[in-house]
Structures are given as C-alpha cells and as structure tokens.
Amino acid sequence: AEKNPELASVLKSADLVLPDGIGIVYAARLQGTPVKERVPGIEFSMAALEMLAQRGKSVFLFGSKPGTAQQAARKLAEKLPGLVIAGCEHGYFKPEEEASIVERINGSGADFLCVALGSPKQELFLARHRHELNVKAAIGVGGSLDIWSGNLKRAPQFYRKHGLEWLYRLIQEPSRAGRMARLPLFLVKAAVGKKEDQNG
C-alpha cells in the first residue's frame, strides 16, 4: 500500500480490514496503537462460511489455479453440509474477461463471495466491482482456497500460536522468500515512523 496509492485508497475505504499478518500486529505495537490480537483471514472466512451453512446460504469461490476452487468447494460441502456452493471460477483470466466473471458471480445468486487472487489483485478486483456485485458481502481470502482444497496444509498450532505461520508457509512455498524478506524492513519503517511522529 505504501508503494501503491490505489491499494492504499482501497484499504482505507474497505468496510473491514483484518490484522491478518503477525507483521501488522508488531507494527501496530511499535506505532503505539496495538491491536488486541491477530485475526487470521482464513479463520474469519471459515467462521463466516459456518454461519452461512447454519442458515442455508450460499458462497461463490473465485480464484487460485484451475481446479482448486472446485476442490475447495467439494471439501467445504463435506465439512459444512448446509453450505450452498453457488459457483466456482479459477483466477486465471484476461482483463477483458473480468466483466463476464462478474456476470457469472451475479448470475449464481451467491450471498457471499470469496476472492483468492492474492494481494493486491483481489482487493483491487473487489473495489472495482464493489457497486456491480450483487453479493451481500465479499472478502479477499488470499491462499485460503489452497488450504481448503487440501493442496496446502495450514501451519500446525505451535506455529500459529507463536506468530510463525509465515515460516511454515515459506517452508511449503520457498518462492515466497522475496516477499517474506520484506517483513523486517516493514517493521523498521514502522519503528522509524513512530519516532518521527514523536519528534515532529
């Protein structure tokens, strides 16, 4: 968001922003505005799906590699029998196909939309189509479809409890090393920003 003004604007205008990463929790402490606790997006999303299942409501799963959303849908349907899967769509599409994807989501009649395009693509997609989508609520779920589908495993409780879920994910996906390496720099900027605020 620091380097992408459009994303910064989207985050500021969102109805809800979760402190999903441990880096955000540490940065908030450094800034003197601590958040109560980390709220993993996957847990928030699963709680929403459980609530939908209890009420017989529906979800549309959009994103990830071809076949992943369908696999996730099958696993979720087994785990949450009351949940209606309104539709699935993979996240590999051309810009000119975006309008037809929105039409498919709307045509499905889904109550809830989970978008797994990675950040910032998922946030920007939701912001662009915020007023066109007919769903009651939508959320960017990052890699949740990969976990719900069984393609990736979520970190064991030990890693989650100690703020090391990022490390477990890095072990599973070494290609994320560059992204993970930016976390210490982010924390340094948060600390420096706080010091400048105090001096300014």
Image (tube, rainbow, N blue to C red):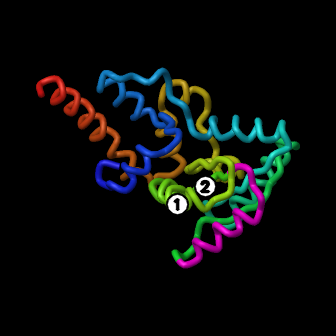
Residue 110 painted magenta:
yes
Which residue ends up furthest to the left in the rendered image? 199
Side of 30 where 167 appears, left or right: right
**Boundaries of the magenta span:** 96-112
Mark 2 residue crowding within 10 angstroms, few (<14) / some (14–19) / many (20+): many
Q: Amino acid at mark 2?
A: Val
Q: Residue at x 34, y 41 (%)?
A: 183
In the image, farthest residue toward the right: 81
The residue under label 2 is 115
Image: 152 above or below 193: below
Q: Which amino acid, mark 1? A: Phe
Q: Residues within 10 Å of mark 1 (few under 14, many from 20)?
A: some
Q: Is residue 120 magenta?
A: no
Residue 91: % across, % down = 60, 65
Q: Residue at x 70, y 49 (%)?
A: 112
Upstream in the sequence, badge 2 or badge 1?
Answer: 2
